[in-house]
Amino acid sequence: PADGVAERRLHPVTPLRRAWAPIAVLVGWAVHDPDQAQRQLTRLTTTHLVIGVAVLIPAAALYGFLTWWFTHYAVTDTELRIRTGLLFRRTAHIRLERIQAIDVTQPLLARVAGVAKLKLDVIGTGKKDELAFLGADEARALRAELLAR
């Protein structure tokens, strides 16, 4: 980095979580219009289904990996910086004095994998920024570091 601040990555298990996004889009479409989904599925042959699955799973895995690869965070003296985006880059500059609350959460599968989500409640914003997922110990240490600053 140009300013000398060391950027860190999320936990390596994160791509598995993000790989579900393309599959969730298909499931959402099927739930939204079940009749159309059933008509489309009955038109497909077994070969088409196998090819579709053979393409969908690696594409979802690649999506998960690339979104993880292009997500970084860094803590400076004055802010938490979160860089995301594969095609459209986004950098969130969260000033430390504007952080109201920091929660460490571990849903069931995250607990099994030993990872945690860091949720940031920032004054003046309607949405919560988050770092999902960090190692459980790393999430607690980062929370303590941010609160100490």
Image: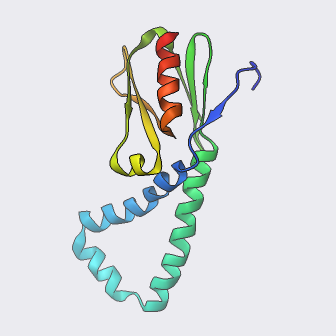
* Snapshot quadrant of residue 6: top right
The picture places residue 42, in percent across and down from the top left corner, at 32, 87
Total labels: the figure holds 0
Instruction: Classify 37 as above or below 137.
Output: below
Measuring 41% from the left and 47% from the top, which residue is drawn there?
110
The picture places residue 2, in percent across and down from the top left corner, at 77, 22
Q: Is residue 1 left or right of residue 133?
A: right
Q: Nearer the viewer, residue 72 or 31?
A: 72
Q: Nearer the viewer, residue 27 or 74?
A: 74
Instruction: Classify 25 as above or below 131.
Output: below
Measuring 53% from the left and 82% from the top, which residue is drawn there?
51
Q: Is the N terminus in the top left, top right, bottom left or bottom right quadrant?
A: top right
Instruction: Classify 101 as above or below 110.
Output: above
* Snapshot quadrant of residue 25: bottom left
The picture places residue 88, in percent across and down from the top left corner, at 58, 40
Q: Nearer the viewer, residue 99 or 44?
A: 99
Color theme of the render = rainbow
Measuring 56% from the left and 56% from the top, which residue is drawn there?
63
Q: Is residue 51 left or right of residue 30?
A: right
The single residue placed furthest to the left in the displayed view is: 35
The picture places residue 119, in percent across and down from the top left corner, at 40, 29
Measuring 31% from the left and 61% from the top, which residue is drawn there?
28
